[in-house]
Amino acid sequence: MVLGALGLAGPVRAQVFDGPLVVIDGDTFDVGHTRVRLYGVDAPEIDQSCTNPSGVAWDCGTWVSAEVRARFEGQKVRCEEVVQDLYGRSVARCSLRGKDLGRTLVQEGLALAYRKYSMAYDLEEKGAVVAGRGLHAYVMERPEDYRRAVRADRVAQNPAPDPACMIKGNINSKGRRIYHMPGQEHYDRTSIRLSNGERWFCTEAGARTAGWRRAKR
């Protein structure tokens, strides 16, 4: 249930925490000292564009972040962790004054239901579409499709320097060195940043010797 684009690591003991909300983008917040990716919803990326009825592109990702910030920044929320992702974020359901924040965002057309992980907000999104609320007044690529296209473009612009050395040695946000083999789940969306110490490997043995471990999927 919780795999794929979010890079979820697997179930952990549920944690409940609260604190003032600091908006990072439309579906990612800091709650106290915890970075939270809101469960079951998907908002456009900061650099993602939509098209208005006249065919003019505009920065709807930045608009959503600004709207969420204006409405909810600084207010106290209560969150219950569902899982942690591979980036160390808490994927959680959060409530504000007893109301499900994810449901509110989808109802207002500020985020979409992330049906790949949860059908909890399916009807809310359909209602927002019918009413033309928020993002649904415009033409927008679903955020997960947008991210997939961006990853494909990055891969095309960041090819392996040697076609015989296709193993990607990535360093995650916690500093863990993980290598990805061609055909693994996260291989295509993993880019190599040489300036950060990441590197390409020709063999698994070489990657392990250098201190990397194989990705689980």
Image: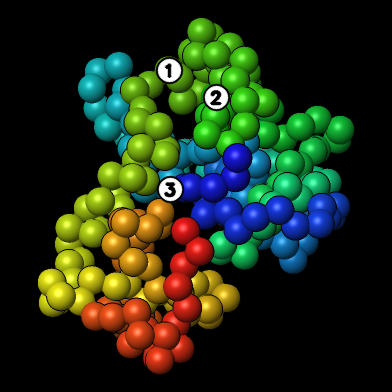
Reading the image, the residue beneath label 1 is 137
Question: Which mark sits nearer the N-terminus, 3 or 2?
Answer: 3
Residue contact between numbered discs 1 and 2, judged by CB atoms under 8 Å: yes
Gap in angstroms between the C-alphas marked 1 and 2: 9 Å
Q: Residue at x 37, y 68 (%)?
A: 180
Reading the image, the residue beneath label 3 is 46
Q: Residue at x 72, y 35 (%)?
A: 101
Give residue 137's position: percent from left, percent from top.
43, 17
Vertical placement of residue 215 versus 75, above or below: below
Q: Is residue 194 left or right of residue 216?
A: left
- Residue 109, numbered label: 2
Question: Which mark sits nearer the N-terminus, 1 or 2?
Answer: 2
Toward the bottom, the furthest residue is 209
Q: What type is the residue that disc 1 sits on?
A: Ala
Q: Residue at x 55, y 43 (%)?
A: 26
Give residue 216's position: percent from left, percent from top.
50, 64
Q: SS class of the residue under badge 2? A: loop
Q: Quadrant of residue 171?
A: bottom left
Specify few, some or many for label 2: CA neighbours under 10 Å numbering under 14, 14-19, or 20 or more: many
